[in-house]
Image (cartoon, rainbow, N blue to C red):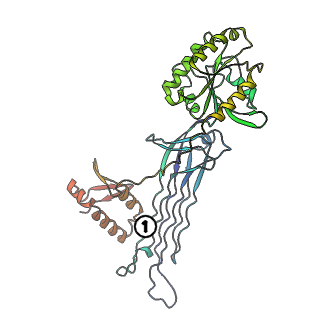
Amino acid sequence: MFFDEAKIYVRSGDGGDGCIAFRREKFVPFGGPSGGNGGRGGDVYLVVDRNLNTLYHFKKQVHFKAGRGGRGGSKNQQGKDGADLSIPVPPGTVVYDAETGELLADLVEEGQRVLVAKGGRGGRGNAAFASPTYQAPHLAEHGEPGQERWLRLELKLIADVGIIGMPNAGKSTLLAAVSAARPKIADYPFTTLQPNLGVVTVDDYSTFVLADLPGLIEGASEGAGLGHQFLRHVERTRLLIHLLNGAAEDPLADYHVINRELALFSPQLAARPQIVVLNKMDLPDAQAWWPRVQEAMQARKVEAHAISAVTGQGVKALMRRTYELLRSLPPPEPVTRAPAIFRPAEREDAFTIEREADGWRVRGRRIERLAAMTPFVLPEAVARFQRQLRAMGIEAALEEAGVRPGDLVRIGDQELEWQG
């Protein structure tokens, strides 16, 4: 079964907690703070693996999580960094944020990788808070929580040439005749419900990749039939073989239907170079249609060929001509590397305050991170957090909004009682 769509959950590792420790050595009666910082959490990456050609492995595993950072130790020992996680994907994978629909990456080259969840930084140990006026801090931070998100993956096949045409035009038969691919073949529409790839060898040494794509019908640009699932795979190809069914009622009408659907889906796709090929020349109907197809294509200045994929008539000449056209086309555009996915907010200290039924909610990137990293069981940590609220203007904003002593204030996962 061919899987070209998947939805997965990724979570980077939490940072390790910082340590509270003091030097306890002989002849050092008043040793200073020596608590080390926690290690950073592991990152999550998607990495292109050319040995994969579908997204089937995501059917068996949906959740992925990187390693957590280690806790800091005494004697200023840094916690161990969490293990990064690399998730293999096939070439041609397009990555979207499942919640926002934002395009995050287009992965096509072997070894190409993109960061999709950045690990949390390690919490600082008490040695990091020491100063000339604060020589024995009993204060450390929790590690920063890792980032989590759902991703939607789409696979667009990477092939040089795509065979397009109405259902039952003979696309699978042609692919089987010119390559080692063995797609399902039968005499009824929609035999091909999934794309098939084959490598075509021309003159014993030259090769190109040919894709047999599911049949296209009227209304496909709006999702009818196999719709967008078909059209997505055509986008990668540099050249199209437009296969016409010589035994159809009107092959030229089919030709116009398919080109119209391509144009509705993407003008760039409709402008892709085409070779029009009338198939099934072993049948009398196809032989009768061939002069009319030739005349129509000459008027459009489109190259036309006649073949029989079953008997092999004209097939070798078609493949040789296809290879010649590929060599004459400009090379594929260079891959645009995906930008960094996690972009900091324009103002990290920006925040909002909302009134809830039983309290208040403070939202903001920086303040929520501070709340998550503060160990509220330590009085010094609570005092430091209150100073940060005051410095960021959150305390004044809450009082202006009408907060009262005893009110519940939520920041991230923390629930705090306002003291006033």
* Nearer to us in this view, 246 or 219: 246
Tag count = 1
Report whether residue 292 is seen.
yes
Q: Quadrant of the N terminus?
A: top right
In the visual, does 168 lie left or right of 396? right
Residue at left 70%, top 28%?
A: 321
On screen, 132 above or below 386?
A: below
In the visual, does 239 lie left or right of 345? right
Residue at left 61%, top 23%?
A: 215
On screen, 374 above or below 195?
A: below
Q: Where is residue 24 in the image (x, y as percent from the top left)?
A: 50, 84
On screen, 282 above or below 318?
A: above
* Nearer to us in this view, 7 or 374: 7
The residue furthest bottom is 27
Report whether residue 183 is seen.
no
The image quarter containing residue 290 is top right
Q: Position of residue 75 (x, y in %)?
A: 52, 78
Residue at left 47%, top 71%?
A: 19
In the visual, does 385 lie left or right of 60? left
* Nearer to us in this view, 162 or 400: 162
Q: Quadrant of the C terminus?
A: bottom left
The residue furthest right is 204
The image quarter containing residue 191 is top right
| Label 1 sits on residue | 141
Name the kind of residue labelled 1 in the image: Glu
Q: Could you classify mark 1 by the number of other residues whose Cα lies within 10 Å: few (under 14), some (14-19), or many (20 or more)? A: many
Q: Where is residue 299 in the image (x, y as percent from the top left)?
A: 57, 16
Q: What element carries label 1?
A: loop
